[in-house]
Amino acid sequence: MTEKIKLTFLGTGSMIPDEKRNHPAFLLTYGAENILVDCGEGTQIQFRKAKLNPGKITRILITHWHGDHTFGLPGLLRTLATSGYRKKLMIYGPTGIKRHIYEMFRAFGGPEGFQIEVKEVSGKFFETKDFYLAAEKMIHVQPCNAYSFVLKGSTRIDKKKLRKFHIKSGKHLAHLKDKGYMVYDGKKYMLKNLTFNEGEKKVSFVLDTLFNGKIVPFVSGSDILVCESSFSSEHEKLAHEYKHLTAKQAAEIAKKGHVRKLVITHLSQRYNQHPEKILGEARKTFKNTTLARDLEVVSL
Ligand SMILES: [Zn+2]
Ligand SMILES: [Zn+2]
């Protein structure tokens, strides 16, 4: 488990891009996996600027079908086709994504030379021995998902707990790991009561959504939470009306969810000249907050 997770912020703007902030797109790399979260217009150019190869994308996770999160898809898929992409590309999204992708293919033509599979997902939807991906339904103007990438840690025997229960080392501990429980001296012990998890890492993405009770449990324990902060609290009414989060709400989510680091993104263009206003507001509630910048890379 020495492999690092690398997160590249390809686009950190919102509805209207400017010279500093492109439309939303985030690339999470782990080993051979290159998972793109959202694909705003110009994402393929951002790949080039970041000196990354879009041909290595393995999965695309779409939060919702608003243009700022999806207008880069037809161009990116066309580039993949013409540059020899021959893998099967998985695209995941909320309810309705299949129809949207189908309509996009009807308008612009489907992929040529490679296969695309589209899945409407919620809950844990993809798992390998090292990591899993999960989705949770958010509340926005249209169906929207939040996503988490969770690198599974390894289960380690807690020696303190063994001493506490007067359990000696031996084959029974292998049984505990295999079966999830063991019987020792006539007593049954569950795996979670004698072990701890080491090295689990979690990165969560919460894009356009109204503040809601599902967010904190979903992002709980994240090492990095990438979260939209479209508005400041003085525009809380607007945030509610357009179904977005304020900086304060994003910070409250990070605090309640015991997140290690909050990275805010998707600021409304009204804060273009003063993004520190949003950052300052979030930091009042959750100190370890940064404002995402285009082409910034974070490793963990
Ligand atoms: Zn958006
Ligand atoms: Zn939206």
Image (cartoon, rainbow, N blue to C red):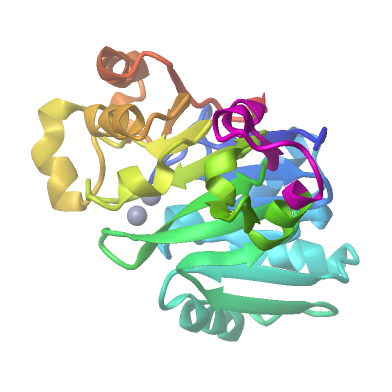
Residue 274 on image: x %, y %: 32, 16
Q: Dividing the picture into quarters, in which one does residue 46 lie?
A: top right
Q: Dividing the picture into quarters, in which one does residue 275 lie?
A: top left
Residue 72 drawn above or below residue 225 = below
Question: In the rendered image, which quarter contains the N terminus?
Answer: top right
Q: Dividing the picture into quarters, in which one does residue 178 lie?
A: bottom right
- In this view, the residue in front, 178 or 111, is 178
Residue name at image x 40 percent, y 59 percent: 136
Q: Is residue 257 left or right of residue 57?
A: left
Residue 157 drawn above or below residue 144 = above
Question: In the rendered image, which quarter contains the C terminus?
Answer: top right
- In this view, the residue in front, 41 or 238, is 238
Is 163 contained in the magenta span?
yes
Q: Is residue 187 left or right of residue 35?
A: left
Residue 251 drawn above or below residue 143 = above
Residue 109 visible somewhere in the drawing: yes
Residue 219 drawn above or below residue 243 = above
Residue name at image x 27 percent, y 58 percent: 140
- In this view, the residue in front, 265 or 253, is 253
Residue name at image x 68 percent, y 52 percent: 131
Residue name at image x 73 percent, y 70 percent: 89
Residue 38 visible somewhere in the drawing: no
Furthest-left residue in view?
237
- In this view, the residue in front, 30 or 54, is 30
Furthest-front residue in view?
185
Q: Is residue 129 left or right of residue 241?
A: right
Is 215 contained in the magenta span?
no
Q: Quadrant of ligand 2?
A: bottom left
User: Which portion, as a residue range, is magenta?
Assistant: 154-173
Residue 138 on image: x %, y %: 32, 58
